Amino acid sequence: MQVTNASNAREVDPAGGRIQRSTSLVEDVYEAIFAQLMSLKIAPGSRITVDSLVKELDVSHTPIREALGRLEGEGLVLKTHLIGYRAAPQITRRRFDELYELRLLLEPHAAAKAAASMDETKLAVLQESAGGMARREGKDERLRYSNFARQDAIFHDRIMEYANNGLVRETLAFQHTHFHIFRLMFHSRVTEEALDEHQAILAAFAASDPAAAEQAMRRHIEHSRDRLLPAFD
């Protein structure tokens, strides 16, 4: 599987194959493990054995440990002294409700602020991010799903950046909200319906309409919440 970004071309097999070629080995290892966590191939709460990953990805211990350290910083991996690594447990229903309450308090207002200061350059950045989510490159559903989760996080973070409130942006980023939410349900509906909602947000930004942007963001977050509630049934 070819995975490419603007600064680094690499080949990763997130389905469990070996790292084929790398200009940034730690980044490749990180992406491979991230894809497995997001698609639930590595189940929430399960133990992650470094030696098993060394054999699976055909790399040394060092890049594995560095990648796991990065994932630990993102709240997706936990490390316990003398025990080792495990995937973070799935968020509870209470935590889920709290995260969405936080998002509904902060993100619609931030979207309105971003719309008020929108210009062509900012809009182009957001459109590119949304376009990356819409692309269905490659055959591996796990890789596409993990890519969507990352692009979705970037899309929302950019909006928070353009709202020009660093504290709000840091607060939401610290929760690693999108990563934990996307781990709840590996299903195409989670991504397909979100694409239409993102387009409504972009349309409000293109019109520099704060009220429409606030409404579109609120609707998007509410629909996202409703899509994922069945994960707790």
Image (spheres, rainbow, N blue to C red):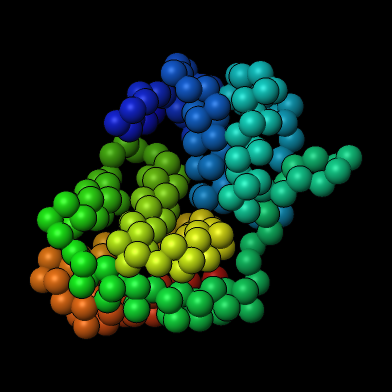
Camera-side residue of 87 and 26: 26
Q: Quadrant of the C terminus?
A: bottom right
Which residue is at a point 12% across and 56% down the rendered structure image?
Answer: 120
Which quadrant of the structure image shows residue 205? bottom left
Which residue is at a point 52% across and 50% down the rendered structure image?
Answer: 38
Is residue 135 visible to us here? yes
Q: Across the whole image, how many numbered discs are drawn on residues?
A: 0
Q: Position of residue 192 (x, y in %)?
A: 30, 61
Is residue 184 visible to us here? no
Q: Residue furthest right?
A: 82
Q: Position of residue 150 (x, y in %)?
A: 42, 50
224 to the left or right of 30: left
153 to the left or right of 174: left
Q: Position of residue 118 (x, y in %)?
A: 19, 64
Q: Quadrant of the N terminus?
A: top left
Which residue is at a point 80% across and 40% down the rendered structure image?
Answer: 84
Q: Position of residue 71 (x, y in %)?
A: 60, 44
Camera-side residue of 19 and 214: 214
Which residue is at a point 67% across and 54% down the rendered structure image?
Answer: 88
165 to the left or right of 26: left
Depicted 215 relative to depicted 182: above or below: below
Depicted 143 relative to depicted 100: above or below: above
